[in-house]
Amino acid sequence: MHNLTIDRAAQFAGLTLGHLGREYPSKLDQVLTGPEDLLAPSRLHPIFYGSFDWHSCVHGWWQVMRLLRLFPAMQQASAIRERADAMLVSGKIAGELAYLDRPGAQGFERPYGWAWLLALHQELALHDGQPWAAALEPLARAFARRFHDFLPRLTYPLRVGTHYNIAFALVLARRWAVGHDPALKALIHERALGWFASDRACQAWEPGGDEFLSPALIEALLMSEVLPADAFARWFDGFLPAIGEGEPATLLAPVIVSDRSDGKIAHLDGLNLSRAWCWRTLARRLPEDHALIRRARAAADDHLTAALPHLAGDYMGEHWLATFALLALEAVETSDASGFDRLAQGFQL
């Protein structure tokens, strides 16, 4: 069994502190309206300029702040606090907000980066007595407004296994909305049920060659949060009716990563980690006597065994994989399914 220990926490924190402030190489998400827009990443994004791209920097911050809270005695704790005190301040957050007002920035980091920013704010709010969450809240509210605007206009769900996957974004956004925006939580439930409640007999044509999310399993994870337990079990049995017999087999077997220096192919290490996160969480949310639970836990362990040795060694994976390792390792300890609203409680299958 793979568990989250203080030694692993220190490993993850050490890796991530090494790139949170590393400005180059950098991959920008930017629409140029003129030559004056050609600025250094740290000029465009006063906080989230490291870690190769904006969203990886955001979830790198989520990762180190979560590890700080879970393991306050780890070696890197003081360095994390010092960096947070210097960076998570109103003046720098104002610079991040200003970027959102630029022409062409409406789709900036939609929806993956939006969701991770909300997750970061949710984590910071758990650090009692610290000013970080209050400083970041205006940016979180800005991205919440973007979700409010975008979700009603998204006619069809985005089912890909990359950053555009809507189910993954809604898992993170919903967890934030539970405590910060009840209207957004209700909207997420409405859209999730409308998009996914009728899905049956998923074929799971995956993995794609550059995916780090399982479209099938992340959809199931979202539905496990939106539906009450009994309704979710019925939905899941219809969605993957043969998974107890090992089909589709592709969902249970770790994927092969042929070239970790290729940033897209390196996504597949993340797929192994995110599948482990999904399988561990789903095993907790299915009935205790469900036939899949033992298989799900074994699949999660197999995926972690395949991925954990490869968190470091090449920057294409090193700048982000530890975040997904944390999701997977922590999943055995915690469950975030709670607070089902009236809409989900009233849903019948």
Image (cartoon, helix red, strand yellow):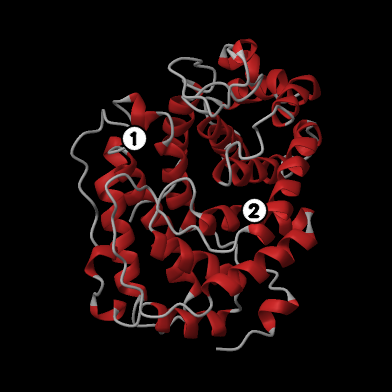
At 47% across and 21% down in the image, what residue appears? 19
Element at badge 2?
helix
Neighbour tally class for label 2: few under 14, some 14-19, many 20 plus, Cα within 10 Å = many
Mark number, residue 173? 2
**Which quadrant is home to the N terminus?**
bottom left
Q: Are marks 1 and 2 in contact (CB under 8 Å)?
A: no
Judge whether 182 appears above or below 149 on screen.
Answer: below
Give residue 322's position: percent from left, percent from top.
Answer: 42, 37
Disc 1 crowd, CA 10 A, few/some/many (<14, 14-19, 20+): many
Viewed as shown, does residue 128 lie left or right of 287? right
Q: Is residue 252 visible?
A: no
Q: Nearer the viewer, mark 1 or mark 2?
A: 2
Residue 311: image tag: 1
Residue at the bottom extreme?
Answer: 349
- Would you identify the image quadrant in which residue 264 lies? top left
Is residue 228 left or right of 186 when viewed as pictured?
Answer: left
Marks 1 and 2 sit apart, C-alpha to C-alpha, by 26 Å
Residue 151 bears which disc, if any?
none
Q: Earlier in the sequence, mark 1 or mark 2?
A: 2
Quadrant of the image occupied by residue 288:
bottom left
Q: Amino acid at mark 1?
A: Leu
Res 318 seen here: yes
Position of residue 295 relative to residue 119, above or below, is: below
Q: Residue 231's spot in the image, x, y percent? A: 56, 84
Foreground of the two, 9 or 133: 133
| Residue shown at the point (50%, 28%) measured from the top left | 53
Locate residue 218 relative to residue 194 in the image: left or right.
left
Residues 183 and 252: in front is 183
* Quadrant, the C terminus: bottom right
Instruction: Please name the amino acid that badge 2 sits on.
Output: Ala
- Residue 135: name its quadrant: top right
